[in-house]
Amino acid sequence: MASGAEGIVLLDHGSGGRATHQLLREVFFEAFERSPELLDAALLEDLQGPLAFTTDSFVVSPLFFPGGDIGSLAVHGTANDLAMVGAEPLFLSCGFILEEGFSLRDLRKVVRSMAEAARALGIHIVCGDTKVVPRGKGDGLYLNTAGLGRLLRSPAPHPSRIRPGDRVLVSGPVGDHGLAVLAAREGLPLKGLRSDSAPVWPLVKPLLEVLGEDLHALRDPTRGGLATTINELAEESGTLIYLDEAAIPVRPEVRGGAEILGLDPLYLACEGRFVAVVSASRAAEALDLLRGLAGGEGAALIGEVREAASRPLVVLRTRVGGERILPVLTGEPLPRIC
Amino acid sequence: MASGAEGIVLLDHGSGGRATHQLLREVFFEAFERSPELLDAALLEDLQGPLAFTTDSFVVSPLFFPGGDIGSLAVHGTANDLAMVGAEPLFLSCGFILEEGFSLRDLRKVVRSMAEAARALGIHIVCGDTKVVPRGKGDGLYLNTAGLGRLLRSPAPHPSRIRPGDRVLVSGPVGDHGLAVLAAREGLPLKGLRSDSAPVWPLVKPLLEVLGEDLHALRDPTRGGLATTINELAEESGTLIYLDEAAIPVRPEVRGGAEILGLDPLYLACEGRFVAVVSASRAAEALDLLRGLAGGEGAALIGEVREAASRPLVVLRTRVGGERILPVLTGEPLPRIC
């Protein structure tokens, strides 16, 4: 292409003319294994409902971090949102907003990473769009993905189905993604940090199939971390959720790093974990199931649902045996982690 | 909200915590008439295929321009892409990338404008996402919409169905959007310019219904303008497309303004027009049909399809009676018009 294999993004790449077509052919179509057909919309002839539809924009900084990059993250993030309503992730769109001057080499890396993440998950990237903004009006690359999935079962898991007595599970240790991105951005000398960015559908699908109606709700603890997610579930179900801090899995490297920085791991984002609320009678079975699956080895039973007294609430039984209210994230400890 | 009704976007609004929830409730849910339920994905239980799926990011500058704004444009642009494959626009996602410091008043205006454009078209905005980037890393607001539609008929119109002998129609005058945005951005003292941003489905639907298989291809001349769009159709069908410059409708204000700026209206973007390629035997009927519909009064028959000689090509018969090759847009006359 005009700007060379190791070149940069030019404003002309966003004009819709020859340079745009070249960029599409030489960077996107090759990686996504699509013929260079410029249809306005992708045709999904065989797709049957009921369906789920979601979108997420990604503005993570830095673009590349231990355990992932904005490309794989944009696939996992949106696919995981589909999984959280019990939908099999099937199709993705991608919208790139490129800053003039961004390295085409890095763009190729991101696009390849997206393509690999999609292939690994069996999801198809079927449509896309590329815009270019002038230098100083972006930050290299912002990326939107919208996702379409098919509900595995209907009705889908939903917070309104949460009942007092239910048990709360998490699929693995929390906080890795948020701390790994923060450390990479700030150049912090913390060891052993790595994003947990991963697709959760391989764990969610068997859970849906085995538990059926006893799987009441799912939610992934992304922005705002586990504490905020559990608060959302309490709020939306009108319950009190009681968590046992000692039971919440946090890797020692994350616990240590967060302590040094004065952060609480319960507010650090995950991008490859989920919370499941299940009937008490099936909790042990659900936990065994998750622990027996690749990627679910660190699953844990972390709490239970109770009747709310005056209002929905999350209460944490602390390691030292006390109890405190665990609020939603307020303030802004961790911007641009997704 | 914390920053006041006339306040600004703060980094905290993107944290995923309390401030994000407030922003969603107070700005988005109200305008989009959704209950403040924070499901990870929207459920489309009743949707049946065959479907079409598309995405577009909008980085237009300025955000507000005569005849529209980034909100209405993001609805029309994506809905029109669905219409171009013969699909009824049904559902939209929206992804906002806000710059820290952006006016909440302007955000409300954009969101209301989106909601109105969606209501007018009968399309539902069912899921969304909001991210905040620091000052100097954006330009107020970037907006992505992905769209989902149902094919009215299958097989959909497709450039591969274009045949020598077919006629080429355009649904109205071209170039208004591109020139109106450029003039607004540069503060040019040109009179009578107004974006053509509008949904095309109300014209496309009857055309599909009446012409059936005789409607061979559709494409909207957005970035790159009519000239680039016709080149894409020639390329994808392996034909020569012969256009009659005198027949191409261009409003006098657009022709005059473009002349002053040294621009060719055939390369200026439209956001509410489309090109239709139809069987010769139905061309007059198609033209009458369009002209009889609100918004189609300015439709015109502008050319015909011929056998390509050595390669696909667009040839323009000029006003003075000569012939010249009409190439794809090269260079960058008009950045950030969508």
Image (cartoon, coloured by chain):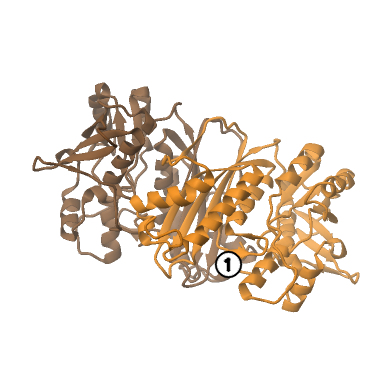
Chain colours: A orange, B brown
Residue drawn at the location 42% of the way across and 56% of the way down: A131
**Left or right, B170 with reference to A241:** left
For label 1, the crowd category at 10 Å Cα-Cα, with few meaning under 14, some 14 to 19 and many 20 or more, is many
Of B332 and A227, the residue lying toward us: B332
**Left or right, A302 with reference to A335:** right
Task: Where is residue A108? Give x, y as percent.
Answer: 51, 56
Residue drawn at the location 34% of the way across and 56% of the way down: B337
Give the farthest residue toward the top: B281
Task: Where is residue A12? Give x, y as percent.
Answer: 35, 58
Of B130 and A62, the residue lying toward us: A62
**Left or right, A289 with reference to B229:** right
Position of residue B52 relative to residue A186, above or below, is: above
Task: Where is residue B94? Give x, y as percent.
Answer: 51, 51
Quadrant showing the N terminus of chain A? bottom left
The chain holding disc 1 is A
Dividing the picture into quadrants, the one containing residue B16 is: bottom right
Task: Where is residue A68? Give x, y as percent.
Answer: 64, 59
Of B98 and B319, the residue lying toward us: B319
- Amino acid on which the number 1 mark rests in the picture: Ser
Give the farthest residue toward the right: A321
Residue drawn at the location 38% of the way across and 58% of the way down: B60
Which residue bears the numbered disc 1? Answer: A61
Quadrant showing the C terminus of chain A? bottom right
Can residue A230 be seen here? The reply is: yes
Q: Callout 1: helix, strand or loop?
A: loop
Can residue A55 be seen here? The reply is: no
Dividing the picture into quadrants, the one containing residue B139 is: bottom left
Position of residue A161 relative to residue A47, above or below, is: below
